[in-house]
Amino acid sequence: MALLEVEHLRVEFETRRGNLIAIDDVSLAIEEGEVLGVVGESGAGKSITGMAIIGLLEPPGRVTGGEIRLAGRRIDNLAYDSMRRIRGKEIGAIFQDPLTSLNPLYGVGRQLAETIMAHTDASPTAARARAIQLLGEVGIPAPERRIDAYPHEFSGGMRQRVVIALALAVNPRLIIADEPTTALDVSIQAQIIQLLKGLCREHGTAIMLITHDMGVIAETADRVAVMYAGRIAEVGPVRDVVKSAKHPYTKGLMGSIPIMGREVERLSQIDGSMPRLNAIPTGCAFNPRCPDGMARCGVERPDLMATGGPNRAACWLYAPLGVAVHG
């Protein structure tokens, strides 16, 4: 059994003009110690999926269908207080901007210690000792001296390390990492990536890594799910998705990435843009931009299907022969 199981998740936003479907029938699973990368353009639904899993959807957003299970226990229908106990203890979160996760009025040590005491029986002395240990684990130099420093006294990369320490404070089984390296320069990004990979190896922590950066996914993830317009377009082992993409959208993403050592006059591009939530086309949402589109694509919406390899793609190019268009 997978540690996290998301089945047929549906998230809607209620507006005066009707309900907008932001996540439409998304299913995914993450094993213990696995890094699942979730990638796609802005507006694909990556962050909303992560927020739904940790129960932090902002109104008017709400889960209207499907189930989310953590270690076999359903968590999407829990009361607020019950979900708050799971958040932090069993599920940690790392967000793009560390300043949104840290209180500027308190030293980082106090914030770590309070998190530890909120979810365990640790005494203030033991919590402080654990906080110092955590800061050392995430690469903060001289943690015993810096534990009482305030967030503004750390650089961006060091603040992100503090946020990772917060996420790890009580050894959660799953971490939702939403664009954890976007605001950092390349050398710091590499350090954070190595840190996340080390956590998986040492603690068996599972990570859902949400990003638009395929380079980060290729370096960090075991498997990758490519999202488009609130659905999963393709999922598979990261090496197979990068080297042998099956869905036309994934092929376009891969073709737009420059490759070191290879000279090309012009990178490929995907014409058009992601549809707005109130204008998602019928059939396959990628159909208007797809170079391989056919009549069926504008009528029926495909589910993930086998492609003859380890990848699965939501594309009619891989439909079994003899399967007819409905209605």
Image: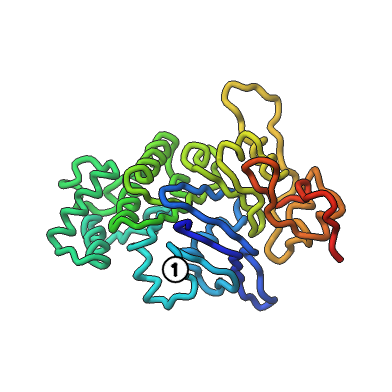
Task: Work out whether residue 289 can be spotted.
Answer: no
Tally the numbered discs: 1
Locate residue 303 relative to residue 172 in the image: left or right.
right
Q: Position of residue 314 (x, y in %)?
A: 70, 52
The residue singled out by tag 1 in the image is: 73
**Which of 20 and 235 lies nearest the eye of the viewer?**
235
258 up-or-down from 306: above or below: above
Q: Which residue lies most toward the left here?
A: 125
Could you tell whether 245 is left or right of 4 in the image?
Answer: right
Name the colour scheme: rainbow
Determine whether the residue tagged by mark 1 lies in a helix, strand or loop: strand
Q: Nearer the viewer, residue 270 or 2?
A: 2
Image x and y of residue 85, in percent: 34, 70
Residue 318 position, x and y percent, is 75, 47
| Amino acid type shown at disc 1 | Arg
The C terminus is located in which quarter? Answer: bottom right
Q: Is residue 268 above or below residue 15?
A: above
